Image: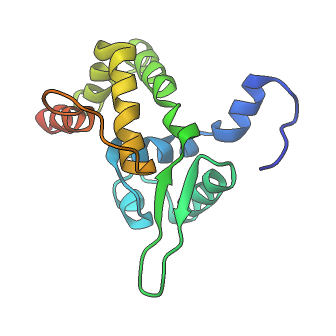
Amino acid sequence: MASARSGCPINAAVEAFGDSWTLLVLRDVMFGNRRYFRELLAGSEEGIASNILADRLKRLVNSGLLTREDAGPGRRAAYRLTEASIQLVPVFALLGEWGLRHRPTSRRLRVRAELLVAGGPELWQEFMAELRTIHLGEPAPERDGPGVMERLAEAYAAAR
């Protein structure tokens, strides 16, 4: 991991994930459960180019926000969130809330942000626990009813 230009925490964060493509790749791994290069490329709502995606994945691995499971012959490399990137859930929720309030959005793409805003920190913690199970192999949390990933997917599908 390269050292930051300054000791400012905001600068350090911006240097780690400050460009839009980096945040969108993390979003797609986190909320879309896309873990392979081709899934990320094909599922990109914004149409990321393959060279940009390859660069951002490399940067995210180098900065400790993703891990890359080395693929054997004939296998695809899988990407996983790290604890550092899982802890960005509240940041994504707040960015989404800001976008809902201050930018034009489409109904289909705003439903997940609305769900995160409505659920607040309690839902964010539940979602982070689910992500830890999926990406870090931690035991699944006990819950009554559908998990956050399932609720996010249902909300997205219903808005289509």
Q: Nearer the viewer, residue 121 or 31?
A: 121
Image quadrant holding the C terminus, namely top left
In the rendered image, residue 23, in percent from the top left (x then y), is placed at 53, 40
In the rendered image, residue 30, in percent from the top left (x then y), is placed at 41, 42
Q: What is the basis of the colouring in this image?
A: rainbow
In the rendered image, residue 37, in percent from the top left (x then y), is placed at 45, 64
**Measuring 32% from the left and 21% from the top, which residue is drawn there?**
123
Is 28 positioned to the left or the right of 152 in the image? right
**Measuring 77% from the left and 28% from the top, which residue is drawn there?**
11
- Residue 154 visible in the picture: yes
Q: Extreme bottom residue here?
A: 73
Q: Nearer the viewer, residue 132 or 142?
A: 142
Is 125 positioned to the left or the right of 114 in the image? right
Q: Is residue 100 above or below residue 135?
A: above
Q: Nearer the viewer, residue 153 or 82?
A: 82
- Residue 46 visible in the picture: no
Q: Is residue 10 above or below residue 72?
A: above
**Measuring 88% from the left and 30% from the top, which residue is drawn there?**
6
Q: How many marks?
A: 0
In the rendered image, residue 86, in percent from the top left (x then y), is placed at 49, 37
Is 58 positioned to the left or the right of 10 in the image? left
Residue 153 is drawn in which quadrant? Answer: top left
**Measuring 33% from the left and 46% from the top, which residue is drawn there?**
32
